[in-house]
Image: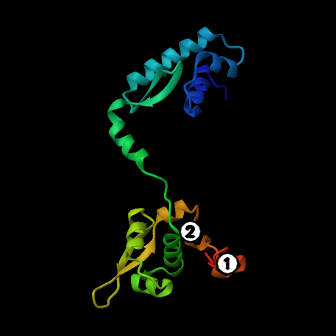
Amino acid sequence: MSLSLRDIVEGLLFVSGDPLDVDRVTAVVEGVAPERVQKVLDELEAQYEDMGRAFVLRRVAGGYQFRTKPELSPYILRLKKKSPTRLSQAALETLAVIAYRQPILRAEIEKIRGVDVGGIVKTLMEKGLVRGVGRKDLPGRPIIYGTTRKFLETFDLPSLEALPSIEEMESLGPDDEGRLF
């Protein structure tokens, strides 16, 4: 398969985090005149504008870069404001109990951990790591908790079966503060 200069330039623009100028593209694609690279960039800029897509190719900071249309900025800002999932030790411990013992009731988690976990479970649910998977047929119909697909994605697990066994965790020994995990 032979690649056209257009395909190469488009690919370079796609993977570059910074604006690419004609000189940089010419240095990567040896043997091509800067004028030819400039012509391809101009054509791509016009083509992306005509497509009516959510992104365009723009001249910025001395080079060219794919940019989203300005009218999308409220959505992008909301997306970018989301911080990475950071969990306290208490939240990690609660999450581990849920992951290994699911489906599980809040009262069962509290019995294992020895502390109230209402706020922690709420936080884990807000982060999308835990969800209610049903209700137990007991007085008050308490929520039964389990982990979510996002839990698997966050911890890079193909499935719950990929969690290390309790025996494997215990074989690692306690941390500096005496905790197993």
Which residue extends farthest left? 140
Measuring 27% from the left and 87% from the top, which residue is drawn there? 140
- Total labels drawn: 2
* Relative to 58, residue 177 above or below: below
Which residue extends farthest bottom? 139
Quadrant location of the C terminus in the rendered image: bottom right
* Relative to 144, residue 137 above or below: below
Question: Which numbered marker is on residue 174?
Answer: 1
Where residue 39 appears, x then y in whole percent?
A: 54, 12
Measuring 51% from the left and 26% from the top, which residue is drawn there? 65
Where residue 26 appears, x then y in whole percent?
A: 66, 17
Q: Which residue is tagged 2?
A: 159
The type of residue carrying mark 2 is Ser
Tell me which corner region of the image, top left, top right, bottom left or bottom right, holds residue 56.
Answer: top left
Where residue 133 appears, x then y in whole percent?
A: 38, 75
Tell me which corner region of the image, top left, top right, bottom left or bottom right, holds residue 29.
Answer: top right
Few, some or many residues within 10 Å of mark 2 (<14, 14–19, 20+)? few
Where residue 87 appears, x then y in whole percent?
A: 50, 64
Q: Nearer the viewer, residue 169 or 133?
A: 169
Q: Nearer the viewer, residue 90 or 161?
A: 90
Question: Which numbered marker is on residue 131?
Answer: none
Q: Nearer the viewer, mark 2 or mark 1?
A: 1
Measuring 63% from the left and 16% from the top, which residue is drawn there? 23
Label 1 SS: loop
Few, some or many residues within 10 Å of mark 1 (<14, 14–19, 20+)? few
Left or right: 51, with 39 as reference point: left
- The mark nearer the N terminus, 2 or 1, is 2
